Image (cartoon, helix red, strand yellow):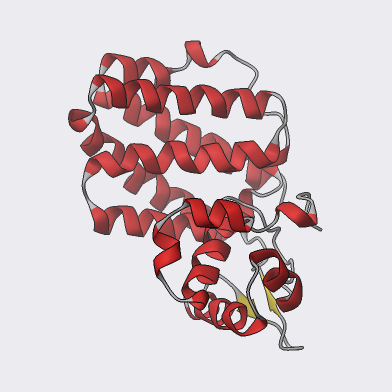
């Protein structure tokens, strides 16, 4: 059972349109990008069925583009087809969870290390602000904001790595991991001030190693909490 209200499980049309590049594609492409991003942000719970009509109504498109989008995500192993032909989010699996965790730790460590030399003062300020917003949302158990800002923080930072293949690989891992950390994201998990974290200190000091280690630790910590819920 999803802990996210029905109206928030997929990006609303206004947010979809604000993403710019999605507008340029076909309706099925836009539906695909929206549902994929919703998966990345943990909007769907493990085992949850993705029903065509509610998704189509939420995205403001017909059923056909949504069906095509779901089939594409099935082909990418982000979703699966059940015996009754419905499409669902895969269930949690400990081995899969740990494999994704290890890959994310490694690849995102590479990304943040590569990004650091390319960050200007304004870039650091913006990334730091996103990090503060993330901690604030998690402290107040605001799951919807947590999922959105968490995604923005990581991928805004990784774009400075200027490694599109690496970023694409990380995105694919997020699609796989999103449903697994769905429950963890709606609970308060941050008990200390963001100002005291190595991640913020590393960003402000332009210390690539400190930032990398702190970010990797945050990923491990998140997956440990998700694992405790299995």
Closest to the observer, 213 or 10:
10
The image position of residue 124, as x and y in percent, is 32, 23
The vertical placement of 126 against 67, above or below, is above
How many numbered discs? 0
The image position of residue 11, as x and y in percent, is 62, 56
Residue name at image x 62 percent, y 52 percent: 42
Q: Determine which quarter of the picture holds residue 170.
A: bottom left
The vertical placement of 184 against 230, above or below, is above
In the rendered image, the residue lying farthest to the bottom is 84
The image position of residue 98, as x and y in percent, is 52, 53
The image position of residue 212, as x and y in percent, is 33, 31
Residue 222 seen in the current view: yes
Residue name at image x 76 percent, y 55 percent: 7
Residue 109 seen in the current view: no
In the rendered image, the residue lying farthest to the left is 117
Residue name at image x 34 percent, y 59 percent: 168
Residue 63 horizontal side relative to residue 3, left or right: left
Closest to the observer, 225 or 17:
17
Closest to the observer, 217 or 160:
160
Position of the N terminus by quadrant: bottom right
Residue name at image x 71 percent, y 77 percent: 52
Q: Determine which quarter of the picture holds residue 94.
A: bottom right
């Amino acid at each position: 059972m999803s802990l996210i209200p029905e109206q928030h499980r997929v990006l609303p049309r206004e947010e979809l349109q604000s993403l710019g590049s999605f507008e340029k594609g076909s309706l099925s492409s836009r539906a695909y990008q929206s549902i994929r991003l919703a998966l990345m942000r943990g909007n769907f719970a493990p085992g949850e069925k993705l029903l065509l009509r509610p998704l189509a109504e939420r995205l403001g498109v017909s059923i056909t583009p949504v069906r095509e989008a779901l089939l594409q995500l099935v082909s990418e192993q982000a979703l699966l087809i059940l015996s009754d032909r419905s499409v669902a989010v895969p269930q949690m699996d400990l081995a899969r969870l740990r494999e994704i965790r290890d890959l994310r730790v490694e690849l995102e460590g590479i990304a943040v290390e590569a990004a650091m030399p390319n960050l200007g003062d304004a870039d650091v300020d913006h990334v730091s602000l996103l990090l503060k917003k993330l901690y604030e949302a998690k402290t107040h158990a605001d799951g919807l904001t947590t999922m959105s800002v968490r995604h923005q923080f990581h991928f805004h930072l990784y774009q400075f790595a200027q490694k599109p293949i690496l970023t694409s690989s990380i995105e694919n891992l997020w699609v796989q991991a999103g449903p697994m950390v769905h429950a963890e994201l709606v609970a308060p998990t941050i008990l200390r001030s963001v100002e005291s974290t190595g991640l913020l200190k590393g960003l402000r000091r332009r210390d690539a190693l400190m930032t990398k280690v702190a970010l990797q630790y945050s990923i491990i910590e998140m997956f440990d909490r998700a694992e405790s819920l299995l």
